[in-house]
Structure formats: structure tokens, C-alpha cells
Amino acid sequence: MTPGRLLLIPVPLGPSAPQAVLPQPVLEALRPLRHFVVEGARTARAFLKAAGVATPLQELEIRELNEHTKRDQLDALLAPLLAGHDVGLISEAGCPAVADPGADLVALAQRHGIAVVPLIGPSSLLLALMASGLNGQRFAFHGYLPAKEAERQKELRDLEAESRKRRQTQIFIETPYRNRQLYDAVLKTCQPATRLTVATDLTLPGESVRTRSIGQWKNETPPDFERRPTVFLLLA
């Protein structure tokens, strides 16, 4: 039997209508699907309904893949694909498999020779980089930095040194309720001439992308990013 395809389906970065941020061909590819692997079932069902999936939600097969999923459970998630069904992979926000547990299923699909189809949609990391004015030719994403202050400061010093050496934009994120702690750590640790971009609520009504040197940020009111999804970018 010919395996199905694993379709990587982006979703909005916040409370936006899918039609506002996803191309029509993506919505058309999504609507016939009956099998989904998602990071969170509740938000996935809300997205599928808003995206115009006509099949009653209770008739869809929706399985979760998140930080609680054990490695030995991945084979079961692959089963519909091996049975010939196309499967949609959906993250909580943005593009699946990028800073997302769905990467494990993609890796397994690749090992089994299953076609993996990335679909077009919003990526907060690339949108932030596009709008930052920092180096878009050479960049690296580091995910979450250490939570402990001493470890975080060391990591920031290392990232700044690497950025200076390679002219590389460093990209990192934080849990929204700890944005201010990370921001304060960057200002405390990095050199005055290093540039920092703070990109908040991308594609949403409150979107803000501001790039300043560390010295300039120290003389400005901190960004309004409390409990709002934010991407930080740094270039020494």
C-alpha cells in the first residue's frame, strides 16, 4: 500500500481568522483531511472549524503530540500514514516542527520514506528576522535560554561573542510572562553597541517590531510585551 503524505499545516500566531493569514491553497489542502496530529486537541478543533473543515469534528481522528508524548508512542501516530491516509500536522501556533514537538513525527516519517509536505504560513521567527534590519544572510535560532540568571548571562555573553565573530543574528524566545526578565538580562549583559530587536504579537493587531542598540534601549521605556508572544533578535 502506498503511504499517505504528512502535511505540515501552519496556523495563525494568535486569535486571527485562518483566512486572514493562510493562502487559499493551504485551506483547500487542509479541508479534505480526516486524520490529524496536533499539539493541543482543543485549539486544533477550534482552528479546523474556523478554517472551514466541513466534516463534523467528532468524525475526525485527532491525536496529540506534545511535550508529554513518549518516544514509544510515535509509531502509533504514524499508523494512519502507513495505512495510506494523508495526515495533517498542526502546532499550537505558527509552523509545525519548528521549535515544536511535531519535529519528532517528521523525522520518523522521513525514516519511513513518507512524503512530507510543508505548507505556507506564518513563522514568527522569519517574520521577526525580516522586519528586524539585522543580518538575514546568517542567523541561528536558540529557542529558550536558561532560566537561572547566572546561566542565562553566560549564554548571552556567548551568543554575543559568536554574533560578533560570525556577524550572525542570534534569535531566541521566552515564555511570555518572563519577557521582562529576559529583556532586562540582555540590557544588563550585552555591550551598548549591540543591536536588539523586540518583535511582539506578529500578524496580530498589536504587532510591534523595534530595533535599537542596547545603549538606546536603556534610555527608552521598556516595550509593552507583558504576557504577549515575543521574539528577541541580537546582532553584535
Image: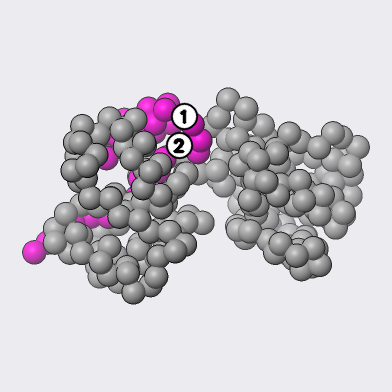
Kind of residue sitting beneath label 1: Ser
On the image, the x and y values in percent for residue 28 come to: 25, 34
Kind of residue sitting beneath label 2: Pro
On the image, the x and y values in percent for residue 213 come to: 83, 43
**Horizontal side of residue 32 vs 24, given as left or right:** left
Q: Is residue 46 magenta?
A: no
For the view shown, which residue lies furthest in the bottom direction? 72
**Horizontal side of residue 151 vs 176, given as left or right:** right
Q: Nearer the viewer, residue 151 or 42?
A: 42
Residue beneath disc 2: 12
* Label 1: which secondary element: loop
Which portion, as a residue range, is magenta? 1-30
Name the residue rendered at 40%, 65% in the picture.
69
Above or below — where is 63 with respect to 73?
above
For the view shown, which residue lies furthest in the left direction? 1
Q: How many marks?
A: 2
* Label 2: which secondary element: loop
**Colouring used for the render:** one colour
Rounded to the nearest whole Å, what is the CA distance between mark 1 and mark 2?
A: 6 Å
Name the residue rendered at 76%, 46% in the picture.
180
Above or below — where is 131 with respect to 84?
above
Above or below — where is 48 with respect to 163?
above
* Whether label 1 touches label 2, CB < 8 Å: yes
**Horizontal side of residue 13 vs 104, given as left or right:** right
Q: Is residue 4 magenta?
A: yes
Q: Can residue 230 be seen by looking at this rendering? A: no
Quadrant that contains the N terminus: bottom left
Residue beneath disc 1: 16
**Horizontal side of residue 230 vs 152, given as left or right:** left
**What is the crowding at mark 1: few (fewer than 14 residues within 10 Å), some, or many (at least 20)?**
some
Name the residue rendered at 56%, 40% in the picture.
127
